[in-house]
Amino acid sequence: MSLSRRNLLAVTGAVGAVAATAAPAAGVEAAGGRSGRHGPRVRTGFDRLAAAGYAPLEGQKAGVVTNPTGVTAEVRHLVDVMHADERVNLTAVFGPEHGFRGTAQAGGSEGRYEDPATGLPVYDTYLKSGQALADIFTASGVDTVVFDIQDAGSRFYTYIWTMYDCMVAAVLAGKRFMVLDRPNPVTGRGAYGPVLEKEFATFVGREPIAQAHGMTVGELALLFNAEFVPEAAGRPVELDVVRMSGWRRGDFFDETGLPWVPPSPNMPTPETALVYPGTCLFEGTNLSEGRGTTRPFELLGAEGIDRRWAEAANGLELPGVRFREAYFQPVFSKFQGRTVGGVQLHVHDREAFDPVRTGIGLLVTAKRVWDGFTWRSDHWIDKLTGSTWVRTAIDRGADTDEVVAGWRADLAAFRRVRAEHLLYRR
């Protein structure tokens, strides 16, 4: 992995809480905000932007990249709130995968249309990047592109790459870019898992970051702008990051007081996000990753698997998690309408739980106890993990410790770069 340090664009001030540098904890407010019955402890970037009367957007035509997660503490969508407020000139909306209002399933979008609630034009950005996306920003007539989407904390969750693509396109179109920060729902305690090798770049990983990055979208935007955007677009984007107040790096989502809105149809709860950085790897196999059940990514299985998998997985004594023999029938996706056997993850100590190590342990044991195990023929597992290492190591019989040890040096290098862009205290 190569992550050379580049000069970070000086970020302009916004509501007195925008990052001016990537120094850890610079200018962070004490965790306080509102709490208990008076409201959430954490105030999002949008909450703070609105409280400041949208001052950083004064005189600007703004367009928002968002989806159903872009809500206030009162679960009003920010587009509806901004459209009704004369202090801001909102002129366009940009919809990612699943769409702005969230009507599309995985791998789909809503297309170009006028939003019935506001009359605003909605532009489809899904799978668009580079000049094609820049042309959309130009056609929209906006001056500033605003990003506000709840992330899930994993490299292969595509909204962070929507943000990255939009940052690059904003440079090409000569637009400002603003990120309204939201919590990492599985905490920002640290980075875990393999780091993407550049030759494996896809929409589930554009650039070399760790599988579980441990950053907020605002922090990722700072890292992207320092390390990757100049190479892709010729220079950094003019970037504002409106920080949260009250969020600490060790906070799980249920400690923020904020409402959870599923960021995609198969991410129904914060508990799903907790296991997702590891169990999403089963998308790269012929096993079900639980899509089409009420517990996606917590239920895993296939026809022909029995109690032996749960027994083998429990035998690894992975920290913070236990495995239950489980049988389920997906209503869509792999094994639709068929009963399969497998495991359900039960995280009993989320502080100790390592989702990536757990995912590797489950792959290792599944291959050992079930002779029907195969990787997807397109080697999707290599795109998810960011290299051939996990697949080839498991195929030659490596155990969990050996597989995890294979990315130790690259992860250490990423952690050093990551530390330069953190905005919030532990």
Image (cartoon, rainbow, N blue to C red):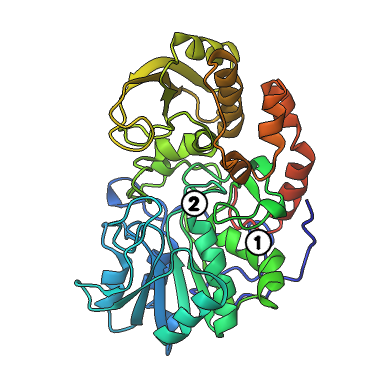
Q: Is residue 17 visible?
A: no
Mark with earlier residue (2, 1): 1
Please tell me which residue lies in front, 118 or 335. Answer: 335
Query: Measuring 59% from the left and 79% from the top, which residue is drawn there?
Result: 171
Please tell me which residue is depicted at 42% across the width and 87% down the height of the picture: 141
The answer to whether 27 appears left or right of 404 in the picture is: left
Three-letter amino acid code at the position of disc 1: Leu
Mark 2 sits on what residue?
247
Q: Amino acid at mark 2?
A: Trp
Q: Which residue is mark 1?
A: 223
Label 1: element kind = helix
**Horizontal side of residue 274 vs 194, given as left or right:** left
Name the one closer to the observer, 303 or 400: 303
CA gap, disc 2 to disc 1? 19 Å
| Crowding near the residue tagged with mark 2, few <14, some 14–19, many ≥20 C-alpha atoms within 10 Å | many
Q: Quadrant of residue 410?
A: top right
Above or below, comparing residue 306 to residue 406 in the picture: above
Relative vertical location of residue 385 with respect to residue 217 in this rendering, above or below: above
Residue drawn at (59%, 34%) of the image? 356
Q: Position of residue 302 (x, y in %)?
A: 43, 23
User: Do residues under tags 2 and 1 come within 8 Å of each other at their CB atoms?
Assistant: no
Look at discs 2 and 1 and give the one toward the viewer.
1
Q: Nearer the viewer, residue 177 or 76?
A: 177
